[in-house]
Image: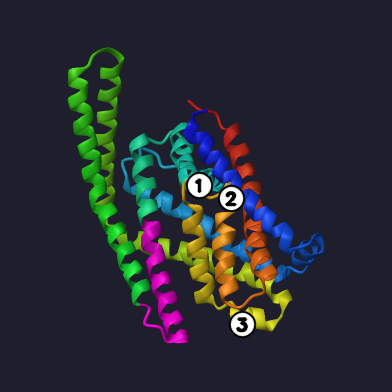
Amino acid sequence: MNLRKLTSLAVALAVTGGLFYFLARTTTWEDWIAIFGGLDARCLFGFLALYLASMALRAARYRLLLRASSAVSPPGMKDLLLVTFASNLFVDLLPARSGSLAYIVFLNRKLKVELSSCVSSFAYSFVFDIFGMLPLFGLAIWLHARQTGDSGLALYGLLAVLAVAGVAALVMLERLLNWGAAVAGRRAARLGGRQRAFLQKAAAEALAMAADVTRVRQSGVFWRLLGVSVAIRLGKYVGLYVLIMGFAGQFGQAVVDALGFPLVLFALLAAEATASLPVSGIAGFGAYEGVMGATLLAAGLAQAQAAMIPFALHLTTQAIDYCLGGLALAWLGLKKRD
């Protein structure tokens, strides 16, 4: 293990260790028994229903993209659901959302889908995740501005930056793939042996990916993709809000009133963005709780409440992700590969 990896691991351990040290100083075992024991079962089941619906919509979006691509035989919904749950497990485990690349591996290796179609469907899903978040983010800014009287100009500016980034990714993806193919082709012409063969294959794959990206873009599925992506994000964040209310309700009506949807949405978006950084803690535990806890503390919650609610939320959602992802991974492991 090189120095860079050791440093990243040490920082991740420090972030997670700092979280547990803070929790140990501000809470007791009785507090944790009480918060999980006091979770409203209706909110838990409501979250599960929205979570499963969101995952089904993700699988449906993958199927829509694969049908629009050059995939010879797109997998059915059952197999795509398995891939969605299994890849979601690796997103939780690995830093900087690198685990989402597991989708490409499972789809290509286990379900025998062409690599170009795997990459194009993954890339479009990533871009439309950004687009799907924009309407909800805009709504949250507007609601927050109405409640506080703040103009929200800085937040609207951030919204515009995200929109431009999404459009740029959509426009530049095909060009980047064609450019990569050209570079690999030129280098292959100057080399020989295995390096030449590898670069020639890489150039051919990049060209196939670019062609697939173009095919999907010209297929006329943009508005359907956008609608499904908004529904995915809506189901996810409403589900998390319901689960937070299930934990917060036991602390009294004042705490529930302090946690309005715009505030919680901002806290979730900020926590997820921080957890997507290269170093955010072991399995994401650390930065996520720190950012959300700071937001809840600023909203007027007591220190113990602001510390426990984010951790309880994260632990519950991770446990569900690991259980369902592990089952999906085991099922995929039983499938034979050509």
Find residue 55 and report its horizontal and vertical position in percent. 53, 55
Circle 2 residue:
15
Q: Earlier in the sequence, mark 3 or mark 1?
A: 3
Asked if residue 195 lies left or right of residue 269, the reply is: left
Residue at position x 61%, y 82% in the image: 257
Q: CA distance from mark 1 to mark 2?
A: 8 Å
Which amino acid, by three-letter code, is at mark 3? Asp
Q: Magenta stretch?
A: 128-152
- 143 is within the stretch colored magenta: yes
Asked if residue 22 lies left or right of residue 264, the reply is: right
Find residue 231 and report its horizontal and vertical position in percent. 45, 65
Q: Earlier in the sequence, mark 1 or mark 2?
A: 2
Instruction: Find out whether the residues at labels 1 and 2 contact each other: C-beta distance under 8 Å.
Output: yes
In the picture, residue 150 is in which quadrant? bottom left
Instruction: Judge by depth and name the residue closer to the eye, 115 or 180.
Output: 180
Residue 23, compared with residue 296, is above or below; it is above
Instruction: Judge by depth and name the residue closer to the eye, 246 or 158.
Output: 158
Residue 173, compared with residue 313, is above or below; it is above
Q: Earlier in the sequence, mark 3 or mark 2?
A: 2
Q: SS class of the residue under badge 1?
A: loop
Residue at position x 47%, y 52% in the image: 276
Circle 1 residue:
279
Asked if residue 175 lies left or right of residue 134, the reply is: left
